[in-house]
Every structure is written in C-alpha cells, then in structure tokens.
Amino acid sequence: MRTLTLPWRFFISLNLSGRIGLLITLFWILMALFGTALAPHALEGIGGGDMFGHFSAEFWLGTDYLGRDILSRILYGARYSIGLALGAAVLASFTGTLLALLAALAGRWIEEILGRINDALLVLPGKILALMIVAVFGSSLPMLIITAVFTYWPGAYRIAWAMASSLRSMDYVRVSRLRGESRWYIAIHDILPNMVHPMLTDFALRFVYIVLLLSGLSFLGLGVQPPYADWGTLVRENMQGLFDGSPAVLMPAIAIASLTIGTNLFIDSLQAMRPLQRLKEGA
C-alpha cells in the first residue's frame, strides 16, 4: 500500500501549476507511446480531405497541404518529437553526470582535462554547434540523437560537477575514504544519491531544450526527414497555410508549446516541493 500511495503523495505535494504541468507532460508521453494505435488514419493516408481543411467531424484537427489528417500526423509525430528528445536527454544527463563523478574523484589532471573540454564546448552556441554537426554528418535519426547529446551534455556536466565537487569534501565521504572504500563505491553510494533530485530537475530542463532544438532543426529542414515526420516538420511543410489560419500549421505548434510549457510548469513546482525522502517517511 505504501508504494501505491507514494505517486499520489508526490502528486499532491506539487502546487496547482505543477500538477497541471505534470498531467500535460504525462499526456504527451502516453501519446508518444500509444498514439499510433489511437490515430484515426494512417501516417501517409490521404483520407480524401481538402487541402488545409478546417475542423470537421471526420478530421478533428483539420487536414494538411495534401489533405492528410493532422490529428493522425501529430500522434505519429509525437514518437519522434518526444522519443528522440527523451532518449537524447537521458544520454546527455547520464554522460554529464558520469564524467562529473569521474572528474570529482579520479584525480586533478583528469578534472582539468574534462573541465577544459567542457569549457570549450560551452563557449560554442548550442544551436550553431548542432547545425555544424548535422551539416557535416547528416540528419539520420541516430545522428540527431548524437547531435543533441553532444550539444547538451556539457551543461549537465557543469551542474553535476558543481554538486559532486562540494559533496566530495563532506565528512561522510571522508569516512568512506578512511574505511578504504573504492572511488566508485563513494561515487555511487555517497555522492550520487545526494545529486539525484537536482539532476532530475536538470534532466527535465535538458528534455525541453532538446525538444526545441530538434523541432527547430526540423523546421529548417535539417531534422527528421521524410517519410518520418515530427512536429517541427509538420509546421514547416504546412507554412503556406499560416495566413489562412489553417489548423495544419497551428496544431503542431500548439503541441510543441503545450509540451514545453507543461514540462516547465512541472519543473518550476519541484523547487517548492518538499523533499521526496520526507514523503517516504510519512507514507
């Protein structure tokens, strides 16, 4: 019963905006997982609709420049807009955290090398760096993930290293060293647990940044390529319907905005949330 009530206790510990943001974020994650099964039409199905058609009983969110159902294409596109961003955010946060622990515990010269590499990457604007990588290596789905990871792991490293470098001087870490524990034991058992909450917040921010990055690349024609389509691609290919107020260009843009706003509301609420350990103690 305790484990069943813990998610609910976490939910009610959030403020109102945080609950709304969490529900919006979970909704889009569920759509990324199961949206293709709920889509009323196939991804490339013409469906007999008018070009840039408006809301109707058959096409709830209108049709695009080829008469295809926009609702179906948004649900299919969620796999790429959310799936690619989520995978890249996990890898970026994992890479940054792992290298930060290595720098904090492995020795002075490794810390200096990783610090200088990180500083050099942080100097470059993220979007310019991503454009350079895509221009050189192409825009396949694996390369888009690698591009996002390479662009955003330095920021995760900076946050993780700042926490790890302060935690390594704590008394309980010194006690572990005096006991003869290995560096990785200290990293996993003493330092990492005290970094989890801030790093989860940073991970959510990385996810939002990567969603916007990949959507921007797709809008420029450098992101997800046909026959695949993410939300940025849907906005780009239907731009000619913007002046007519076509849902084909507005709905994908609203999907991007709702996901990023919802996730940001959830992140902001975590700053005021009582610690998760306290929830466990009261369960």
Image (spheres, helix red, strand yellow):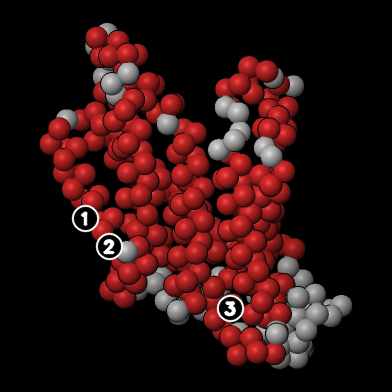
Question: Mark 3 against mark 1, which lies toward the viewer?
Answer: 1
Residue found at the very far front of the displayed protein: 272
Residue sitting nearer the eye, 222 or 39:
222
Query: Residue tagged by mark 1?
Result: 120
Upstream in the sequence, badge 2 or badge 3?
Answer: 2
Residue 168 sits in which quadrant?
top left
Residue found at the very far right of the displayed protein: 57
- Residue drawn at point x = 57 percent, y = 45 percent: 268
Residue sitting nearer the eye, 279 or 2:
279
Query: Residue tagged by mark 3?
Result: 235
Which numbered disc covers residue 124? 2
What secondary structure is marked by label 1?
helix
Specify the amino acid type for callout 3. Val
Cα distance between the residues tagged 2 and 3? 27 Å
Specify the amino acid type for callout 1. Ala
Specify the amino acid type for callout 2. Leu
Q: Mark 2–mark 1 contact, CB under 8 Å? A: yes
Left or right of 223: which side holds 275?
Answer: right
In percent of width and height, residue 220 lies at 45, 79
What secondary structure is marked by label 2?
loop
Residue sitting nearer the eye, 187 or 260:
260
Question: Mark 2 against mark 3, which lies toward the viewer?
Answer: 2
Q: Mark 2–mark 3 contact, CB under 8 Å? A: no
Give the class, few, some or many, for how many residues have Cα within 10 Å of label 3's Cα (few <14, many ≥20).
many
Residue 170 sits in which quadrant?
top left
Give the class, few, some or many, for how many residues have Cα within 10 Å of label 1's Cα (few <14, many ≥20).
few
Residue found at the very far top of the displayed protein: 179
In percent of width and height, residue 19 lies at 70, 44
